[in-house]
Image: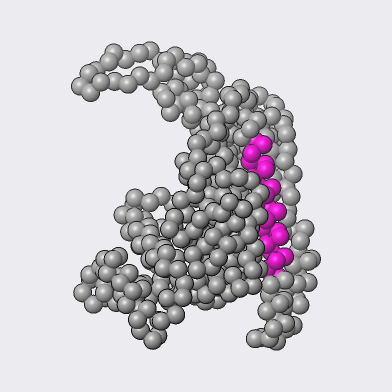
Amino acid sequence: MYLRYSYRIEPTPGQRIALVRTFGCARVVYNDALAARKAAWQADGSRIATGALARRVITEAKRTPERAWLAEVSVDALQSSLRDLDAAYKNFFDSVAGKRRGRRMGLPVFKRKSDSRQSIRFSRNGFRLRGDGRLNLARIGDVRVRWSRPLPSAPSSVTVVKDACGRFFASFVVETEPEILPAVDAEVGIDLGLTHYAVLSDGRVIDNPRFLRRAERRLRKAQQALSRKAKGSKNRAKARIRVARAHAKVADARRDWCHQTASRLVRENQAVYLEDLAVSGLARTRLAKSVHDAAWGMFRRALQDKAVRAGRHVGVVSRWLPSSQTCHVCWVVDGRKPLHIRTWQCEGCGTVHDRDLNASRVILAAGQAERLNAPGGPVRPGVEIPRQARPVERGTHPKPQPVTTGRQAGIPLLW
């Protein structure tokens, strides 16, 4: 599998100028190539080949007075910007054709000089790692790297990123093998929320760190100081950097907490189950700030990525599962309940439930049922699996095997 390893780099003042110049040249090449492809499509519906496009916007452009400064930077970074444009078009067409999962991608847009994040990528021909630990970039020089951990293998490419507060990072793409952890018997269901970040089916509670809420006063003061500065002044530029650094501190703390919590859950459990929350929809409600601060999407991605590397399983149950309405003891759906009701008594068996703890246990049962049903087991929780699904040769008709259903076992339906 391919992974990214990101490190902070510390370029000298001269190297910073060279990096900023390379950012600008790569942006100009990208915009020129995008304009050429748009013009060709509008003219006769044709598509310019990548090789011909590279000759037009890089090789021939260097010979003109308007683009002669393109020769001052590495050609490898300029060619990488054209590959990025091809990838953007491919993502758009795959999204339209239904080959790409997720939200529909739009057409590529022009890059702006005022974008807070700038990046360039170097292939194997554009960088090398020195013996003293420095990163050599073409036309830039040897850059100091803060090595927090060693690379597992030789990198195939490196992306240099400059964020909104002026920090530089080097992101390496390396190929590595999964680190399979020893199998354990524990499995856990997670009910995500805002009062408590997560309630686990084993009774544990993870408190909501609320990084943005805790830093609101500092962010408000920095934003007020920025608003008082005259537009275009140097003091306003300094104040903008202070605001960006304050926000970066919050984002870094949130990201680090999500990864540490996800690593602990993956390490302790063989399978983790959670609910497919509609985060984009909840982010348009009056709870938008708290939803964004919770970063449920980042936490879920971290769980899934770490589970793949460790040989664990992460199951996502349907968002339409009535986890807050179903009793995990007798599986009676007890109807909707307002959010202010935190405990309730089941009408079927009389058990008193904590709302979040019961939901996490329902999610655990539903996730286990879906996982068992994937290889041929029954859907309903608590039903013994009579047999596993076997591969059947094409053209044969195996005899049906008796299967004990949930109704025969006396267990009510979960849905």
Relative placement, left or right, of 31 versus 271 is left
Q: Is any part of residue 70 visible from this angle?
A: yes
Q: Does the magenta stretch include residue 248?
A: yes
- Residue 390 in picture, x, y percent from top left: 35, 19
- Residue 210 in picture, x, y percent from top left: 73, 53
Task: Tell how many labels.
Answer: 0
In front here: 220 or 409? Answer: 220
Point out the stretch of residues depicted in magenta: 243-265
Q: Colour scheme in the image?
A: one colour
Whether residue 270 is situated above or below residue 33 in the rendered picture: above
In front here: 178 or 404? Answer: 178
Residue that appears at 64% across and 39% down: 263
- Residue 319 in picture, x, y percent from top left: 53, 43
Whether residue 393 is situated above or below residue 359 in the rendered picture: above
Relative placement, left or right, of 388 versus 298 is left
Instruction: Write down the quadrant of residue 165 in the picture.
Output: bottom right
Instruction: Write down the quadrant of residue 66 in the picture.
Output: bottom left
Residue that appears at 37% across and 76% down: 32
